[in-house]
Amino acid sequence: MPSMDIVSEVNEVELRNAVDNSIRELQGRFDFRGKEASFEYKDHAVTLSAEDDFQCKQLVDILRMQLSKRDVDPKSMDVADKAIHSGKTFSLQVKFKEGIETLIAKKLVKLIKDSKLKVQSSIQGDSVRITGKKRDDLQAVMALARESDLGQPFQFNNFRD
């Protein structure tokens, strides 16, 4: 019986590359010349620092653009609501969602059951296991999960026939 896992994870290497590319773009941008602005990657989170709150928002846009160029879904970004002001710099923390939360997993399972596909789904920690009789049903579930707007990107692994 074919089965697969639906997971939500961010490629660490691509994330680091996107941050490095953002730093390079920041050094070349004319509107940031002579300003204190930086990206810092540490423990699966990125800290953005700038002299102004507006510049922090621009840094988020730069990072989002570089992530999409590196095929990392920007939906996985969890940007802090407000920049922290300390001294003359504003800092903004950007974390990345890893694993599927229980509430989102329940919504995903309900979405799959409502679609009337002949598959079984079960929540297993940070992933959702899907089993079905036909490979086509699993591919339909993949399309359904990609189209769903649950605020988190999904990847598919352990696809077995």
Image: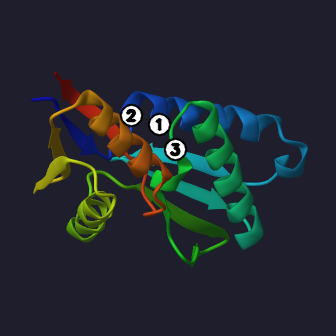
Calculate the distance from the C-alpha at mark 2 to the C-alpha at mark 1.
6 Å
Q: Is residue 1 left or right of residue 5?
A: left
The residue under the point 58% across, 74% down is: 83
Amino acid type of disc 1?
Answer: Leu
Give the residue type at disc 3.
Asp
Give how far apart the Cα atoms at labels 3 and 2 are. 10 Å
Q: Quadrant of the N terminus?
A: top left
| Secondary structure category for the residue under label 3 | loop
From the viewer's perspective, is 7 left or right of 58? Answer: left
Residue 4: where, in percent of width, then height?
A: 20, 35
Mark found first going from the N terminus, 3 or 2: 2
How many callouts does the rendering have?
3
Residue 50, label in figure: none
Q: Are marks 2 and 1 in contact (CB under 8 Å)?
A: yes
On residue 11, the disc is: 2
Say which mark, if any, is on residue 15.
1
Colour scheme in the image?
A: rainbow
Residue lying at the far top in this picture: please name it: 161
* Vertical relation: 12 (above or below) 106: above
Q: Quadrant of residue 30?
A: top right
Where, quadrant-wise, is the C terminus in this rendering?
top left
Q: Are marks 1 and 3 in contact (CB under 8 Å)?
A: no
Residue 109 lies, in percent from the top left, at 24, 61
Frontmost residue, 97 versus 89 = 97
Q: Residue at x 16, y 52 (%)?
A: 121
> Which residue bears the numbered disc 3?
73
Seen at 55% across and 38% down, the residue is 19
Q: Secondary structure at mark 1?
A: helix
Q: Earlier in the sequence, mark 1 or mark 3?
A: 1
- Kindly indicate the quadrant of the structure image that contains residue 140: top left
Q: Position of residue 87 (x, y in %)?
A: 61, 74
